[in-house]
Image (tube, rainbow, N blue to C red):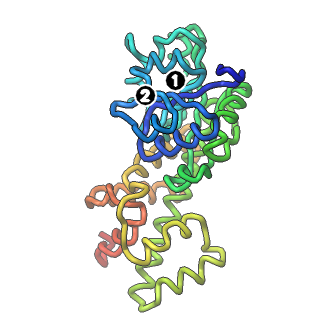
Amino acid sequence: MDSTGTDSIGVIGLGAMGAPMARRLLEGHGRLDFVSRRPQPELTAAGATQAAAPRELADRVDAVLAMLPDLPELEQQLDGPDGLLAGTGDLLLLIGSTSSAPGVRALAERVSSATDGRVRVVDCPVSGGVDGAEAGGLSIMLGGADEDAARAARLLAPCGTPVHLGPLGAGEVAKACNQLVVSATILALGEATVLADRSGLDLEAMWDLLSGGYAGSRLLESRRDKLVSGDDSPSGIARYMVKDLGFADDIARATGTSPALLPALRAAFDEIVEAGLGERDISVTRRFVAGRGADGR
């Protein structure tokens, strides 16, 4: 703990989401430590401290937020003489990636066994995109033991709204549900845009009108201009949906659920990637639908 008696936090993974979250944590707590392969002059100028290795980070703080693409990337930061698990103190590991819920539970068991319970885990995937991260308006889905999740909620509060949803892995289940809804919505928005455009409608006027009814959503609000203009330059990359929907499918099988929509969504996003559009923004669904032939291919 720091001199005020509160938990201190560090960050590994300063990508599109991790960097703005780190800035929010620094502003909210007045202190931040981080590990990065490259210098981060903006963070250090604001008062953050760069650790030389994950082990050094673990020895400096009470909790580490890992904003890495998935569990394999996190595993690389855990082991070895300079890994997080080589630290000497108690540590709360916050897993912010969208990952497999069973995978998170398995990693937590391994980490606990390797450290005699010294390192505990909370999963905390987020929703809200880069805009939400920069504004401190993320939805943060927590899974873990009550005390651990309460600590995580206090630490992550500067980044948005953390809510404890259940035991370890619950955050990842919620994120899979979130991605199911997001993927269905953005595919419907893209398809509707193509139908309206080919029917000669004023797209901007249509989406302004429909956003005030049941078709309105935060996703439409954030992607309306991209859908209207056809600009699908990257913000939320489409190919990530393939992984996320795969996790949703894992949960469906584990819970004995036979989903009606999920298989179609997986097939559509697989097709988007196969068409070479996976690096575009998720609003690429407009271009994807427009480019399909009359036979549906």
Give the CA distance from mark 1 to mark 2. 25 Å
Q: Position of residue 66 (x, y in %)?
A: 49, 32
The answer, for residue 255, to whether it is visible in the render is no
Instruction: Determine which of the numbered discs, if any, sits on residue 106 in the image.
Output: 1
The residue tagged 2 is 35
* Residue 268: x %, y % from top left: 39, 60
Q: Is residue 117 above or below residue 203?
A: above
Of the two numbered discs 1 and 2 on the same chain, state the one appearing first in sequence.
2
> Relative to 219, does residue 121 appear above or below in the rendering?
above
Count every numbered label the image shows and give the total.
2
Residue 64 visible in the displayed image? yes
Determine the residue positioned at 59% across, 80% down.
210
In the picture, measured across the screen, residue 168 lies left or right of residue 269, that is right
Q: Residue at x 30, y 60 (%)?
A: 277
Measuring from the top left, give residue 37's x and y in whole percent: 34, 30
Residue type of the residue flagged with mark 1: Ala
- SS category of the residue bearing label 2: strand
Please tell me which residue is depicted at 53% across the width and 58% down the height of the picture. Answer: 182
Estimate how packed mark 2 is, as few (under 14), some (14 to 19) or many (20 or more) residues with alpha carbons within 10 Å. Answer: many
Mark whose residue sits in front, 1 or 2? 2
Front one among 106 and 207? 207
Residue sitting at the far front: 45
Q: Are marks 1 and 2 in contact (CB under 8 Å)?
A: no
Residue at (42, 92) in percent of width and height: 200
